[in-house]
Image: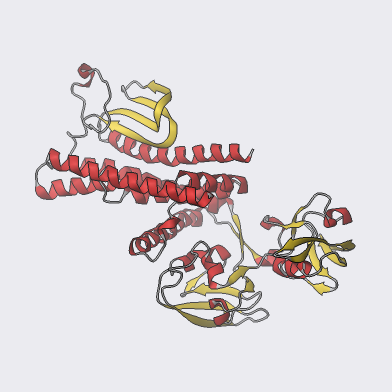
């Protein structure tokens, strides 16, 4: 079932962002009366096709990994057409340079517009986020140097205000590879005053794991001891604990986080313990015997429960709910799109300079895995994934590489400055180089995917 969800979500995601991209080219071409011969989503054998009254063929290919719009006068993809039907039709080459530039830029612009619309919808519906509380500080870490403590609330990093844990990761990811200082603003538990501290870094994380900047900084999120699942016939299940219960204490020791719960249970294998839980407004106590398992030759305890990732089950004081009115949701669509666009541009720049590992580049396998996970997490997570990948597609297509939209815009700019068309030889060699670069990038991304699986 999980495989089916992954496949369906991947096809839906790619088809949507590619379809919107090509629809941008198509719509602007039609606006300037440039004749469109074909609109295709996917590559390879056609699964379905039809032709409209304007003699444009629409089709769906068997491989959902791209698409294209072919206009009259383009020679990138050959199509059999009755020449007599094309007399007096405006071709791409008949269009002015400004019109051609608008058609070319329309694809990436459509991807950014899709992201804006998605973030607008998400803001209007409303979301629940993990708050920016510290659930644990790793020894010897930068977070310890910054004097952060359990249940402290981080309110800013580098003077950028924040209130969710995800924002901590986003802001810190921009500092990967940097040398200088990272400034932290936080409110200590039980205090109403803001404290500030800073830590010095030198080429931060350049040679380390870059997948989770907050964890690398030494910060664990504050995950409450809420039961999200029970192991069938495990100690907790047999004793009568239920999904949604909040562990209040173990052996009369108060529990405030999942990390605390895991630590205390792991130290008491095969031991009878008294566990107190909160269920709604009531408190219940259960006596049960822990199970044990072997970890590196040591016996550890457990009771057969899993942490909850349903934020609606979590205590309201540690989650952040956001829902905007119509006007603010509209503005949020732009600000969120700008935030992630800026993050991607910064990451690409650092990847080029070597500060960020190129191993972060993902291909179709990685996208399908992420799409499947987002789909299982819920509609809003899936929509957010679509928005981020749509921004990625828009940005990548703006790279000044022949065969990409950015390369075509560069050629149009050269032709405008030059005052005459670019020679066929130059175009041919440019396209060959462009195909080589894109193919190399795709192969590299695919190899990264395989390495992740191994």
- Is residue 400 shown left or right of residue 183? left
Q: Is residue 426 visible?
A: yes
| Residue drawn at 10 percent across, 48 percent down | 418
The tally of labels here is 0
- Image coords of residue 448 (percent x, y): 45, 51
- Image coords of residue 42 (percent x, y): 41, 33
| Residue drawn at 52 percent across, 73 percent down | 156
- Image coords of residue 6 (percent x, y): 56, 41
Kindly give the residue lying farthest to the left in the view shown. 419
Q: Is residue 118 visible?
A: no
- Image coords of residue 302 (percent x, y): 78, 61
Kindly give the residue lying farthest to the front in the view shown. 297
| Residue drawn at 59 percent across, 36 percent down | 4
Q: Quadrant of the N terminus?
A: top right
- Is residue 233 shown left or right of residue 433? right
| Residue drawn at 61 percent across, 45 percent down | 376
């Amino acid at each position: 079932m999980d495989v089916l969800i992954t496949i369906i979500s991947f096809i839906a995601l790619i088809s949507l962002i590619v379809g919107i991209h090509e629809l941008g080219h198509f719509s602007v071409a039609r606006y300037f009366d440039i004749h469109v011969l074909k609109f295709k989503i996917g590559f390879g054998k056609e699964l379905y096709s039809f032709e409209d009254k304007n003699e444009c063929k629409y089709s769906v290919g068997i491989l959902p990994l791209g698409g294209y719009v072919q206009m009259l006068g383009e020679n990138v993809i050959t199509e059999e057409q009755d020449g007599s039907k094309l007399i007096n039709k405006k071709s791409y080459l008949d269009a002015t340079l400004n019109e051609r530039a608008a058609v070319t830029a329309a694809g990436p612009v459509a991807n950014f517009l899709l992201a804006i619309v998605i973030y607008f919808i998400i803001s209007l519906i409303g979301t629940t986020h993990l708050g920016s509380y510290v659930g644990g500080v790793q020894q010897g870490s930068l977070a310890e140097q910054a004097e952060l403590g359990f249940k402290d609330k981080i309110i800013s990093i580098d003077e950028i205000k924040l209130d969710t844990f995800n924002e901590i990761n986003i802001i810190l990811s921009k500092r990967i590879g940097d040398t200088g200082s990272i400034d932290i603003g936080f409110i200590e538990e039980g205090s109403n005053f803001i404290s500030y501290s800073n830590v010095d870094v030198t080429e931060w994380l350049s040679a380390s794991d870059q997948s989770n900047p907050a964890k690398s900084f030494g910060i664990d999120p504050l995950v409450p001891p809420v039961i999200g699942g029970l192991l069938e016939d495990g100690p907790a299940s047999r004793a009568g604990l239920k999904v949604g219960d909040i562990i209040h204490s173990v052996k009369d020791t108060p529990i405030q986080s999942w990390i605390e719960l895991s630590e205390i249970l792991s130290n008491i294998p095969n031991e009878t313990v008294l566990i107190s839980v909160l269920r709604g407004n009531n408190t219940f106590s259960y006596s049960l015997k822990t199970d044990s398992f072997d970890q590196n030759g040591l016996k550890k305890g457990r009771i057969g429960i899993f942490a909850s990732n349903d934020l609606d089950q979590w205590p309201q004081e540690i989650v952040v709910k956001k829902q905007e009115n119509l006007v603010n949701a509209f503005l949020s669509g732009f600000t969120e799109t700008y935030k992630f666009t800026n993050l991607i541009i910064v990451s690409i720049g650092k990847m080029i300079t070597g500060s960020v590992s190129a191993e972060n580049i993902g291909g179709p396998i990685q996208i399908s895995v992420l799409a499947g996970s987002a789909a299982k997490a819920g509609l809003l997570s899936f929509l957010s994934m679509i928005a981020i990948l749509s921004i990625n597609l828009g940005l990548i297509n703006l790279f000044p590489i022949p065969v990409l939209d950015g390369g075509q815009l560069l050629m149009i700019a050269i032709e405008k400055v030059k005052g005459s068309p670019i020679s066929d030889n130059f175009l041919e060699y440019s396209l060959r180089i462009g195909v080589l670069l894109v193919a190399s990038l795709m192969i590299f991304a695919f190899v990264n995917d395989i390495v992740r699986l191994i």
